[in-house]
Image (cartoon, grey):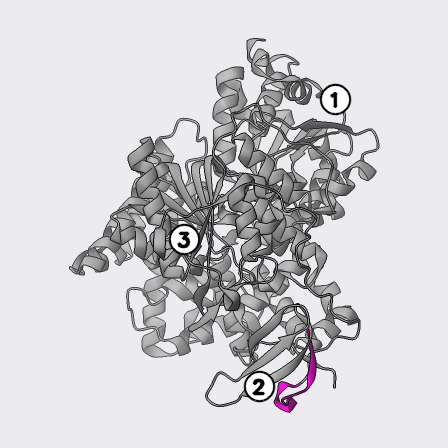
Amino acid sequence: MDFLSTLNEPQYEGVVNTEGPAMIIAGAGSGKTRVLTYRIAYLIKEKGVDPFNILSLTFTNKAAREMRERIEKVAGLNARNLWMGTFHSVFARILRAEADRLGYPSNFTIYDSDDSKSLIKTIVKEFGLDDKVYKPNVVLNRISGAKNRLVEWSEYINNPLYAADDAAAQKPEMGRIYKTYCQRCFKADAMDFDDLLLNTNILFRDHLDVLHKYQHRFKYVLVDEFQDTNVSQYLITKKLSAVSQNIAVVGDDAQSIYAFRGANIENILNFEKDFPDLKVIKLEQNYRSTKNIVEAANSLIAQNKGQLKKSVWTANNDGNRIELIKSISDNEEGRFVSSAIFEQKAQNNYENKDFAILYRTNSQSRAIEEALRKSGIPYKIYGGLSFYQRKEIKDLMGYLRFAINTNDEQSFRRIINLPKRGIGPTSVEKIVVAAFEHDIPLWEVLTNIDMFLPGRAANAVRDFVTLVKSFKIYVDSKDAFEAASHIAKASGLLKELYDDKTVEGLNRYENVQELLNAMKEFVETPEVEDKTLGAFLQDIALLTDADNEDPTDNDFVSLMTIHASKGLEFKNVFIVGLEEDLFPSQMMLSSRADLEEERRLFYVAITRAQDNLYFSYALSRYRFGRLINCEPSRFIEEVDPNYIFVNTRFGSREPKLGKSEQPPGFSSSFARNLMSNKKPVAKKPLQYHKPSVDFKPSDTSKLGEGMKVEHPKFGFGKVRKLDTEGANKKAIVIFEDFGEKTLLLAFAKLRIVE
């Protein structure tokens, strides 16, 4: 087969070794997508495997689409029958087919995080709890974490460990909220994202005949980005491949960066224990980046202890060294970055789309945006408010969802008085409470409203019920586009938007038209078999940020968090805000595991670059409304200085690290070493202090001048001066190893020693 001739030896191995368990360790830029694609094409074309018997799991719909297109080119149109998509989309498909086993209808609603937060907010209010303590975000994360560990609400409320954790976090009602949240979702015939995984596990656990059916259907299971799977995802894939044992996982432990979402790096590290006959194939040749970038990334990730051994290399040219840009402030950092982009475009004929600016948190984009705007450089921010999160879109989607599932409480709350029809919040609460107290579906309350609501409000609800019944007829008999067009008009939403002649109103109207355009495109796509409104809504519910791109409008500089950049590549990459407590994040310094995750995140950022890479840090930055002094990130020093040079092209504006500004471990001698391109000889970087075993921050209100203190990072020192006037109380401390430091007492963690 001619397509196999384009592969190197390990890639070829990864494609043709199709029988039994295999783990393909794929370094950054090593062609893992090609291996996955060709492996599936080889199964279909060479081994005659029916595409219906192949399951391929990815992390974005975009990745699945691109892979399917590539497979079709090699293996023909038969490849359309593959079971391929994200974990959530594939499991949603299984759950729709088997929903009755779990007491759900096949047209259950999928709640997004906004729906979930709204329901949690309602429950917290009903319970009379403090919404500042029980913040919807925090509560949802706790529930999500439990579900991803397969802890159901019944186990949660009966486990004293969880109760103790919640009490310690001053959220003793978490268990009750979790229980009520699950019950309300079930009653609304709705599942959230985490339920798609949890309920698939429950389905396979409690209904062995269903598990048996899918085990024999999926004779080959392939998992992409395996290092980012959580416990729940891994268990499902393990169960599905238990009969055939033909499971191939592709991943890179060095790029495991989603622990905060429940991803478990142990999955990839322990895979061998679960499959003793495992064949390990390593893809170590990087085709993406220059030699300097590859070696710099290797020197960084070598600092991590928990990793699988591999040696990433490239046959590409050496390329330029990494430029290190120092700035006085975050605003100046923005100006330097925009200047460097302008320069590169002028000198090397790059386009805007060849540049990406990566940062640790979204809030860092402000100064960069301002500088790009002033320079007239077009840019796009990833991870902002996506199209499907806009109010007018969610309003129409609420109508569409409710027409399909009349028990969907969140959609009901959204649309019942939109446009205004005289049904106030009190009436809405009475309807919801009636359904809950009498244990009857929401739709039953609405269709018998006279029993629950008096007079005028009841009349308005009756009109609403009649309207929804007419929508249901359209949903059952028309395709997605026709049904949605009718609902948009008949609901009065379209007219309300059309009548608003402001610029914002016009934009909102155009957005709704764009949604209808998307539906038109959906029903006219030949590959789409199910053209119903329900099928379209499921597609939308499972979209990710990366799926919302417009490929026709792409000449802009990309701004995004490093997490969002995973899987992407750019010719020129700027990693900005490389400062201690920002990157690595202050929240990720409590354990070695957290710090190693941050280092992997930096590794991912470095390996996005093809031609040129820039590191940037500022000596001061506004954070939480305060101007703070910053220290360069420890990660800069962990990269071999042979691959870095300090940018001095900005002349007199180049910040000088004077004595008072010299951060520990990043002295002027380090900068000189970088500039001279020599490794420091026999000089180890200054190590941060390891806190005492009994370290516990003291009450700083009792702090006095002359006291001996311990800091978790700077070690032992003596308080020279206290400044307790004004809002920002400070202490000047002389540390034994790190010299004089001015610390804000509101944030400083100090243990009073004597």
Disc on the earlier residue, 1 or 3: 1
* Residue under label 2: 721
Using a 10 Å C-alpha cutoff, classify the residue at mark 3 as few (fewer than 14 neighbours), some (14 to 19) or many (20 or more): many
Identity, as a three-letter code, of the amino acid under mark 2 = Lys
Q: Is residue 722 above or below residue 245?
A: below
Under circle 1, the secondary element is loop
Q: Quadrant of the N terminus?
A: top right
Could you tell me residue 427's position as x and y percent? 40, 76
**Residues in magenta?**
699-711
Could you tell me residue 490's position as x and y percent? 27, 54
Mark 2–mark 3 CB contact (< 8 Å): no
Could you tell me residue 280's position as x and y percent? 75, 29
Judge depth for marks 2 and 1 and give the one in front. 2
Q: Residue furthest top?
A: 1
Q: Residue at x 56, y 77 (%)?
A: 743
Residue placed most toward the observer, 499 or 343? 343
State which quadrant residue 183 falls in.
bottom right
Numbered label attached to residue 19: 1
